[in-house]
Amino acid sequence: MNSTPEEIRQRYEELSFPTLATPRVALMAGYVQHGQTTTLEHVAAVAYLSLALVRWLGLHCDERALVRGALLHDYYLYDWHDHNAAPDNWHGFTHPCHALRNAEKDFPDLTDLERDIIAHHMFPLVPSPPRHKEALVVSLVDKICSTVEVFARQPWHKAENGGTAW
């Protein structure tokens, strides 16, 4: 099911709006994820590019769960660079649990598929693998986005501001 960039953008906006409109989700804009990228920018990039990838590959999947799970995969809501703010010193291993706990609190209708996306996106660092293709896609795209964010300055900002627009 190949789609035009405009179709992907419109579908992403349709699917992401309910999650992004939730007040605590906006808190992710206050935390740096990688480099100069905020956690909100990171999860939005992962969600958008996950949707683009499944469309490009023609994978049939639950796009709503894919986008919502991707938007919530790093919903841990603390500054992991600040060891006084982080709940432990093992962020890379434990943040999926913190993100899942916050997501379950703020989104009581979270599906098992969305839980899988959030809980297993750090595979293989977290030894339990994703159980659904949507979770595997988010896990892979998360690693790609994280790598780009570490090495590129503000990669998700609009091209006129020196970044790569998507």
Image (spheres, grey):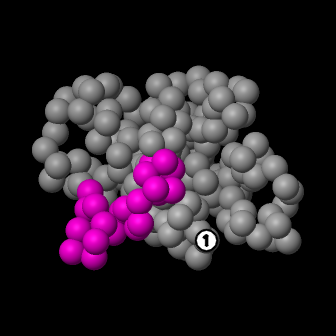
Query: Is 20 above or below relative to 101?
Result: below
The kind of residue tagged 1 is Tyr
Which quadrant of the view contains residue 131?
A: top right
Q: Which residue is mark 1?
A: 31
Q: Is residue 80 magenta?
A: no
In this view, 43 is above or below 143: below
Left or right of 57, for residue 27: right
Is there any visible trace of residue 97 in the rendered image? no
Residue at image coords 17%, 33%: 2
Residue located at (31% from left, 52% from top): 12
Span highlighted in magenta in the image: 145-166
* Residue drawn where x is 45% and y is 42% of the image: 144
Locate the N terminus and report the quarter of the image it occupies: top left
The picture places residue 99, in percent across and down from the top left corner, at: 68, 53
Question: What residue sits 64% from the left and 25% below the top?
Answer: 129
Q: Position of residue 109 (x, y in %)?
A: 59, 48
The crowding category of the residue bearing disc 1, from other C-alpha atoms within 10 Å (few below 14, some 14 to 19, many at least 20), is some
